Each structure stands twice: as C-alpha cells, then as structure tokens.
Image: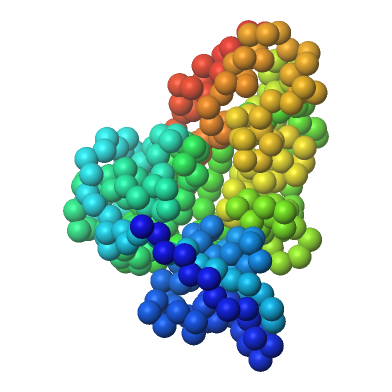
C-alpha cells in the first residue's frame, strides 16, 4: 500500500530551503536521495495540491506539502528474457533498435518489462553501474513510444566516454517525424528553452525563464496527404526531454499521434481529408517519431561508428497510405 505523508505548513523561518532538504528534515525515516527520486519521478510530491518535480526548488512560508511513498520496489531490476534487435555489440557497448512501446528503464507505472530488464538478461552483470541500480548502462533515453537507435554502455569507461559526447552535443542524432500541417519554411532551426510546463508539471514546454537552452534543426522530406501532413527530418543540437515533440508543437506542427503535446485530431487539421485518411490518422497509436541515425566515437578505440535504421512497419505503412491520397 502507498503511504501518504501530509506535512505541517512551511514555517516562516524555513522559507528558502531546498524542497528536498526541507522534506528530508520533516521525514527522517527517508533518505534525502530517496526523497529526491520520488520528487523527480513526478506525481509523488504535491505543493498546495499541484505536483512538483524540481527537487532544488525553494519552499515558501505557508506552503502545504504532501508526499506519496509507493510500495517498495525490488532494489535492482529483474533480468527478463525480452527479444532485442541488436545492431552492434562489443565488450564496451551495445547498440539496439528499440521498438515503440518499450520503456527504457523501470519507473512508476513500468516496474519491469523494460529495456533494462532485457539487457540484464542479455548482458548479465556487465552493464555499467554509473546510471544507478534502476538505470544500469543507460546513457540516453528514447520515449516509450519513440522507436529507433539507442546505445547502452557495458562498463564505466564506455559510460563516461559516451556521456561526455552527449554532454558536448557531438553525437550525431537524426529523427524522422510525421507532423500535422504543411511545415514552412522547408528547413530551419527551432530555438527555445525547454522546462516544465507552468500549466501542467507532467509536460515540458518552451518557457521564457528557468528552462534549458534547446536547438533543433529540421528539413522537410516531403508533404503528404496534400499538405495535411509533413514528413520531416530533425537533428538534435541539444538533447532535452521531449525536445522534438515540444519544439514542433511550439511551431504549430505537433506530431501525429502525440496526445500529450496536441498531436490528436482537430477539426481544422482533418476537415479536408477523406474519411479513410481521418480514421487512419486519428487511430495512429503513438507519436510518429523514429530515431533513424546515431553516430558517435567509440569511447575506447576512437573509431567513428554510425548506425542507421529504417523506419518501422507501422510508420512505413502510414506513409505509404498518405502518399496514395
């Protein structure tokens, strides 16, 4: 059973303390690390009834705070035999084609049947521990419903080397997306700091303050369905949470199938389409986003490695259908 802790209002002399530090002082039976994880995973910590996911935010006098503590999960993920589409593997790293629907690592709502569970079965104890017990080997992530190429570190040398390249933004990453509308101009850059949405803390958004700088470069591959949909390639100059989805939404062209960021059907988007096209687009089951290219320097040898993966069947079938209109 979950444990709901409702704390006394923040006292005036406590105002300005870090959120996780204040909670830790109120809940001595929980470690600060545990509290920080609960905050950042989302939904567990509420301030005046609204979720807070920034452990470093400051408390203010009079705030009413509660924390929901879920049932204890296994300290380490279980090894589970889940098929993997391996593109490359050596003693340092493994590159995979992740299918849509597969969560990368255990999290609330997805305690197992994740990529990490599959990797533990495949690699045994060879995965790097830098990512923590819940995220062994994980250097970067793809959203659950985003498919495509992902690299995982098997040891600390590989983890450090790959993480440095992601931090330097020297990794080559390209994605193909299907977005609503006729995207113009046909190439360009989308800039805008990304942070938690002020209206919905479970979402990210382009924000005027407090976010992290983000830059997405794009080029239109071709319009589809008479311009009702655009097939576009995006390359990440930075790597923020939900970056492509947020940037394209901010530009007015959310991804097909992306219910979180407005990619569902709206009358203005589909009114000119024939009924079969409307049904096909409305019924697409995930955000239409695929990581096609991943290139990096091997952290041990320095060799440049590049992997390209064709778009999966569900996206390919949708594109073929839209081209026929």
Q: Quadrant of residue 98?
A: top left
Residue 308 seen from this side: no
Left or right: residue 252 compared with residue 303: right
**Residue 72: image location, x then y, percent:** 32, 62
The residue located at (70%, 46%) in the rendering is: 247
Q: Quadrant of the C terminus?
A: top right
Quarter of the image with the N terminus in it: bottom left
Residue 227 placement (x, y as % from top left): 75, 20
Q: Is residue 176 left or right of residue 134?
A: right
Q: Quadrant of residue 163?
A: bottom left
Side (left or right) of 218 relative to 41: right
Residue at the farthest bottom position: 13
Count of marks, rendered view: 0
- Asked if one can make out residue 75 in the rendered structure from this viewpoint, the answer is yes
Residue at 53% across, 71% down = 6
Residue 39 image point, x, y percent: 51, 66
Q: Position of residue 28 (x, y in %)?
A: 41, 83
């Amino acid at each position: 059973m979950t444990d709901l802790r409702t704390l006394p209002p923040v006292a005036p002399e406590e105002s300005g303390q870090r959120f996780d530090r204040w909670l830790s002082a109120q809940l001595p039976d929980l470690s600060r690390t545990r509290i920080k994880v609960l905050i950042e995973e989302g939904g567990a910590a509420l301030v005046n009834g609204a979720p807070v996911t920034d452990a470093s935010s400051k408390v203010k006098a009079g705030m009413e705070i509660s924390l929901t503590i879920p049932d204890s999960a296994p300290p380490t993920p279980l090894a589970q035999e889940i098929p993997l589409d391996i593109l490359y593997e050596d003693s340092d790293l493994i590159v995979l084609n992740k299918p849509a629907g597969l969560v990368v690592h255990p999290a609330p709502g997805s305690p197992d049947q994740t990529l990490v569970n599959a990797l533990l079965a495949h690699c045994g104890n060879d995965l790097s521990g830098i990512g923590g017990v819940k995220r062994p080997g994980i250097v970067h992530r793809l959203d659950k419903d985003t498919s495509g190429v992902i690299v995982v570190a098997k040891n600390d040398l590989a983890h450090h080397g790959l993480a440095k390249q992601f931090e330097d933004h020297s990794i080559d990453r390209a994605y193909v997306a299907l977005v609503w509308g006729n995207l113009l101009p046909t190439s360009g850059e989308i800039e805008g700091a990304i942070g938690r949405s002020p209206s919905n803390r479970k979402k990210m958004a382009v924000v005027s303050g407090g976010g992290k700088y983000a830059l997405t470069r794009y080029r239109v591959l071709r319009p589809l369905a008479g311009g009702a949909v655009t097939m576009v390639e995006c390359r990440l100059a930075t790597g923020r949470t939900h970056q492509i989805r947020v940037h394209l939404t901010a530009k007015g062209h959310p991804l097909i199938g992306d219910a979180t960021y407005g990619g569902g059907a709206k009358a203005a988007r589909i009114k000119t389409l024939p009924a079969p096209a409307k049904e096909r687009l409305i019924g697409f089951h995930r955000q239409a986003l695929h990581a096609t290219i991943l290139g990096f320097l091997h952290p041990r040898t320095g060799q440049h490695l590049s992997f390209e993966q064709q778009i999966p069947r569900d996206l390919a079938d949708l594109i073929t259908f839209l081209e026929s209109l």
